[in-house]
Image: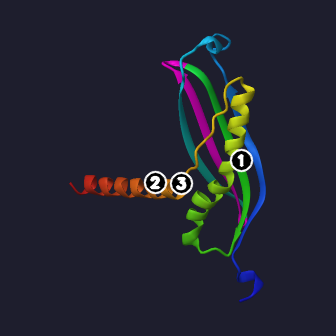
Amino acid sequence: MSEQENPVFAIEKIYIKDLSVEVPNAPQIFLERESPKVSIQLQTNAQGIGEGVFEVTLTTTVTSKIEEKTVFLVEVGQAGIFRVQNVPSENMEPLLSIACPNILFPYAREVVSDAVTRAGFAPVMLQPVNFEALYMSRLQQQEAAKEAAGEATTH
């Protein structure tokens, strides 16, 4: 096998693409004694930016609320540029949807914790995420949607 045929997967760059911190009810929110409820949303996006080069962005949104009042909202777009070459096409989507987010997540976790602390709150420690399970769940949802659409057109 020649050097050119060997699969290549390399990290070119990891960076914060977007960072937003909002504390809309400050300073009054700091006087609240009730424990807030924290919700976390994750979203990944991959796009080709050159021959065999992809940008993958893991967007992590952490929202903290006490009843209907927002305590804080932190959104981090942690991105990376990855070189992927000589990888079979059927492996590309799992690589970009599972492997790349797994690499980016620890960086996003650190940025979220730091941003929340700098906003004056106790750090939020994001628990590990199984991106493979999220990917498989998304595939199942897409299959179910296709089947539902197929049944709707045959009736």
Crowding near the residue tagged with mark 3, few <14, some 14–19, many ≥20 C-alpha atoms within 10 Å: few
Q: Is residue 107 shown left or right of residue 126?
A: right
Instruction: Kindly report the distance in space between the C-alpha atoms of the residues bearing marks 3 and 1.
Output: 16 Å
Q: Is residue 115 above or below residue 136?
A: above
Q: Name the mark on residue 87.
A: none
Instruction: Kindly report the distance in space between the C-alpha atoms of the residues bearing marks 1 and 2.
Output: 24 Å
- State the count of labels: 3
Q: Quadrant of the N terminus?
A: bottom right
* Labels 3 & 1 near each other (Cβ < 8 A): no
Residue 24 rendering spot, x and y as whole percentages: 64, 18
Residue underneath mark 3 = 130
Residue underneath mark 2 = 138
Which residue occupies the foreground of this view, 109 or 55? 109
Residue at (64%, 74%) from the top-left corner?
87
- Magenta stretch: give its range: 51-69
- Amino acid identity at mark 2: Arg
Residue 138 rendering spot, x and y as whole percentages: 46, 54
1 or 2: tag closer to the N-terminus: 1
Q: Is residue 75 shown left or right of residue 90?
A: right
Crowding near the residue tagged with mark 1, few <14, some 14–19, many ≥20 C-alpha atoms within 10 Å: some
